[in-house]
Amino acid sequence: MAWFANPKQAEAKRWIPLLADSAKRDRAAQELIRFGADAVPALMDALQSQDLNLLAIYQQILARIPAASPELMKAFKFAHPIIRGRVADIFGMSKDKHATPALLEALQGEFFTVKARAALALANIGDPQVIHELLPLLQDPEDEVRIAACTAIGKFRDPSTFDELANVTLDDPIIDVRQAAVRALGDSHSPAAIPFLMEALRDSFWWFEREQAVRILLAAIENMGEPVVEPLIEALGDREGTVRKFAAKLLGRLGNPSAIEELGMAVYDLHHEVSQTAAEALAKFGAPAIDVLAEALIHPEASVRKHAVIGLGSIKDERVVPYLIEMLQDSDREVKTQAIQALADMKDTRALPALQQIVTNRADREMASFAKEVIARLQK
């Protein structure tokens, strides 16, 4: 039997089950690393595990045993594709440059899982000379490979690849692949990526009936920070309302004061969602936005006034209370209702007399009841 020939291998094998015990895991891992080459056969067998949590532990230990390299190379060439993919992950963890030729060869292979893992491993190893080998994978027929290629190429943050990644964001038929491409562009934090991301924002594929999917694109744009403020301000004038809405939302998140004036103009946008989003974005600036929102309270369009009230009501500053009280006299019922709600949220007792007047007016019993409810909350 094998353990008679090498008792150290048998001893190392006994530590493998202890990795499943969180209380004993660290000690077991340390012992296996200490065993070095003698622990490799047992760990290689363990790579067949169906438990992905334990699998990651086995991989991390193998990545820390330099003597494992020959067995890993052998498995990467001849083992089942699932094991080959797991070995590729180990090469990525260890950043073993000696594995680069084998990983590059795998990019031309027939097994898509191995190709995807090999691409990611090459990116983790970090030699930029492999970029030109990764770019063709952006056209691979398998979604998993294209996603991995986007991620791998993105790790290099090389502006010369942005045009190729941008083609994926605009042309790939699968949204998951496009998302991988914009993540790569966004994570670059490079101003050179901004025009490509803004072009994607103007592509309706990204946001038409895809409210969840577009969040990845918005996050990538937001990652650009201050350099993207001007392009987003420009996008407030886009002919497509959805683009204007997302531009306003992002400007609110970024919080650059240079956007306040333009967002103030966007509050007057007759596209309902753009106007409200701009008001909500302004509210994030706090006190500096009060005057801008207050100006919109006299606009002839009721929806604009309502959105201005929403914005003011979101600013926790006592200076907005008089404006909200004044809007209780607005001619539009929805504006008045929104003003009452905003005053309820502000919890400022200065609103009590004006709310009491609404209670005594029986012309609108529903609104009177709402005002009465708010008065009760304010008096607690």
Image (cartoon, grey):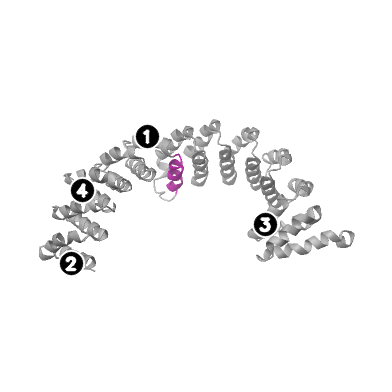
The answer to whether residue 45 is seen in the rendering is no
| Quarter of the image that includes the C terminus | bottom left
**25 up-or-down from 144: above or below:** below
Q: Amino acid at mark 4?
A: Arg
Q: Which residue is disc 3 drawn over?
A: 57
Distance (Cα) linking label 2 and label 1: 46 Å
Callouts 2 and 4 close, C-beta under 8 Å: no
Q: Which residue is disc 1 drawn over?
A: 230
CA neighbours of label 4 inside 10 A, class few (<14), some (14 to 19), many (20+): many
Distance (Cα) linking label 1 and label 4: 27 Å
Callouts 1 and 4 close, C-beta under 8 Å: no
Task: Point out the stretch of residues depicted in magenta.
Answer: 213-224
Which label's residue is closer to the chain start, 3 or 2? 3
Location of residue 21 in the rendering, given as x and y in whole percent from the top left corner: 67, 66
Residue 305, numbered label: 4
Distance (Cα) linking label 2 and label 4: 23 Å
| Quarter of the image that includes the N terminus | bottom right
Q: Amino acid at mark 3?
A: Ile
CA neighbours of label 1 inside 10 A, class few (<14), some (14 to 19), many (20+): few
Location of residue 77 in the rendering, given as x and y in whole percent from the top left corner: 75, 45
Q: Main secondary structure of the magenta part?
A: helix
